[in-house]
């Protein structure tokens, strides 16, 4: 589905002592572990999850082989450290509270994974990116199948595991996280449909026919919105960056066809009474937990006022002791869990990632199409952060790290093209 890389593999020497039939190059092993990490990103209903195990093993493998952080990625490292220092200072005041220590460890670890994903793209960028992306697609397949099977109730013994409040949660603890996770695989599946050859496009359509129903059955309003506007971002950026008039026509025709097909599919799904009732309930913008003096939006305002009086915050996992529910806003949660330090630098990190990422997608590189999907996926997470706590989602840090890795790789790819021009200017001087 993703373009195959023709770039040479680095560190391709086979492991010594391996039998001829079992030899595997060190770079192939790294890509295999990246693929496995992407797959395991879909299985996080247990702690520690397979994702933690796979990402840790992959990280160790890359460190053994050598891993360098590009100077371009330094802002990411500095901001992540400052944010987590804020979390740690605030967390120390309530360290004896249940779950706080684990929350802090998870925060530092996820920040470390973001740096790893950024650093590992420093070499063999396209091949490694494709390996990770393919793994994310397979992870999306696993999560979607679990979601659809769960909602269908074909295996009654799994109902409690795969469903929550009659909403599909698949291999996740929360239906909202399931829906959000599936956005990136959906965007990767959309790419060959709008830009690939017929065979690749057919595969993409099949994958979309799996991912989109799973997102709908999560009954996550944020995920419903994301799948629409993130797809529009991919279509718009692809339309702007392509040089082919026929490709632009294809994008327009496919967009119209996609709207018609999605409308028909949703109408068919809503013909099922149980689905229609829950859809109507979830589609309402006036949920009981959103409104009122203690509702979500009132908590935003009251929490913001509280943040002004708490320079070091109130500590991780403490917001629910002041209000009926959690913050449901990652930017507010940064102030609450990490004081002014995290509260200022968390939105700064999100803004810098989006600004530099947006500039990056317009540079013509072998990984440009995948970069567009990464940018759109992170854009979706960043916007959803206004209405939900996404600061501990694994795929948030995966997308953030990959984005910065691509930003650095794109800067390096521009250097050879800029050097001859600089040499020409020097030669032309008297």
Image: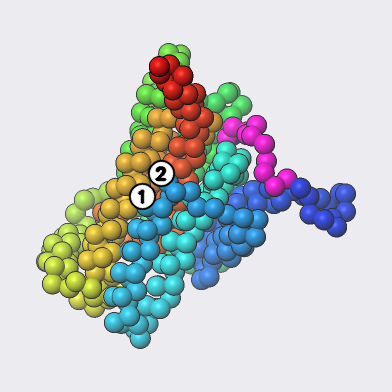
Q: Residue 377 bears which disc, if any?
A: 2
**Element marked by disc 2:** helix
The picture places residue 209, in percent across and down from the top left corner, at 50, 38
Is 88 situated above or below 56? below
Q: Residue beneath label 1, please?
A: 381
Asked if residue 363 shows in the view, the reply is: yes
Mark 1: give few (<14), some (14-19) or many (20+) Cα within 10 Å. Answer: many
The picture places residue 410, in percent across and down from the top left corner, at 47, 36
305 to the left or right of 366: left
Residue 125 position by quadrant: top right
Q: Nearer the viewer, residue 358 or 37?
A: 358
Q: Nearer the viewer, residue 357 or 177?
A: 357
Which residue is at 33% across, 43% downward? Answer: 354
Is 318 situated above or below 166? below
- Answer whether labels 2 and 1 touch (C-beta < 8 Å): yes
Mark 2: give few (<14), some (14-19) or many (20+) Cα within 10 Å. Answer: many
* Cα–Cα gap, marks 2 and 1: 7 Å
Is 126 situated above or below 261? below
Secondary structure mostly taken by the magenta-highlighted segment of the chain: loop
Please state, as top left, top right, bottom left or bottom right, where the N terminus lies in the image. Answer: top right
Q: Which residues are magenta?
A: 2-12
Which residue is at 83% across, 52% downward? Answer: 22
137 to the left or right of 382: right
260 to the left or right of 36: left
The picture places residue 271, in percent across and down from the top left corner, at 38, 41
Q: Nearer the viewer, residue 11 or 142?
A: 11
Which residue is at 48% across, 32% downward? Answer: 415
């Amino acid at each position: 589905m993703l373009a195959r890389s023709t770039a040479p593999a680095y560190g391709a020497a086979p492991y010594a002592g391996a039998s001829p039939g079992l030899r595997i190059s060190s770079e192939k092993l790294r890509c295999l572990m990246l693929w496995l990490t992407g797959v395991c990103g879909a299985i996080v209903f247990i702690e520690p999850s397979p994702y933690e195990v796979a990402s840790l093993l992959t990280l160790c493998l890359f460190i053994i082989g050598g891993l360098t952080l590009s100077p371009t990625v330094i802002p990411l490292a500095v901001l992540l450290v400052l944010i987590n220092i804020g979390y740690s200072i605030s967390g120390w005041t309530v360290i004896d509270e249940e779950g706080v220590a684990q929350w802090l460890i998870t925060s530092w670890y996820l920040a470390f994974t973001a740096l790893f994903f950024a650093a590992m793209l420093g070499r063999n960028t396209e091949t490694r990116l494709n390996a990770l992306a393919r793994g994310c697609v397979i992870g999306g397949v696993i999560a979607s199948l679990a979601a659809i099977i769960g909602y269908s109730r074909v295996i009654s013994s799994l109902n409690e595991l795969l469903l929550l409040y009659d909403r599909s949660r698949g291999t996740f603890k929360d239906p909202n996280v399931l829906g959000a996770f599936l956005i990136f695989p959906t965007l990767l599946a959309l790419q060959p449909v709008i830009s690939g050859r017929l065979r690749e496009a057919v595969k993409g359509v099949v994958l979309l026919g799996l991912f989109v129903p799973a997102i709908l059955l999560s009954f996550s309003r944020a995920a419903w919105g994301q799948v629409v506007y993130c797809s529009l971002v991919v279509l718009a950026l692809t339309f702007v960056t392509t040089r082919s008039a026929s490709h632009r026509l294809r994008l327009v025709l496919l967009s119209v066809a996609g709207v018609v097909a999605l409308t028909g599919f949703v109408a068919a799904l809503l013909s099922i009474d149980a689905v229609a009732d829950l859809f109507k309930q979830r589609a309402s913008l006036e949920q009981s937990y959103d409104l009122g003096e203690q509702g979500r939006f009132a908590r935003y305002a009251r929490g913001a006022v509280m943040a002004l009086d708490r320079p070091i915050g109130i500590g991780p996992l403490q917001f629910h002791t002041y209000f009926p529910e959690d913050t449901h806003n990652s930017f507010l949660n940064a102030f609450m869990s990490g004081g002014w330090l995290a509260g200022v630098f968390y939105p700064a990190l999100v803004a810098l990632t989006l600004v530099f990422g947006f500039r990056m997608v317009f540079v013509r590189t072998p990984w440009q199409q995948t970069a567009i999907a990464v940018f759109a996926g992170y854009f979706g997470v960043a916007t959803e952060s206004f209405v939900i706590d996404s600061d501990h989602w694994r795929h948030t840090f995966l997308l953030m790290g990959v984005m910065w890795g691509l930003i650095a790789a794109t800067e390096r790819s521009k250097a050879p093209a800029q050097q001859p021009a600089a040499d020409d200017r020097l030669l032309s001087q008297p």
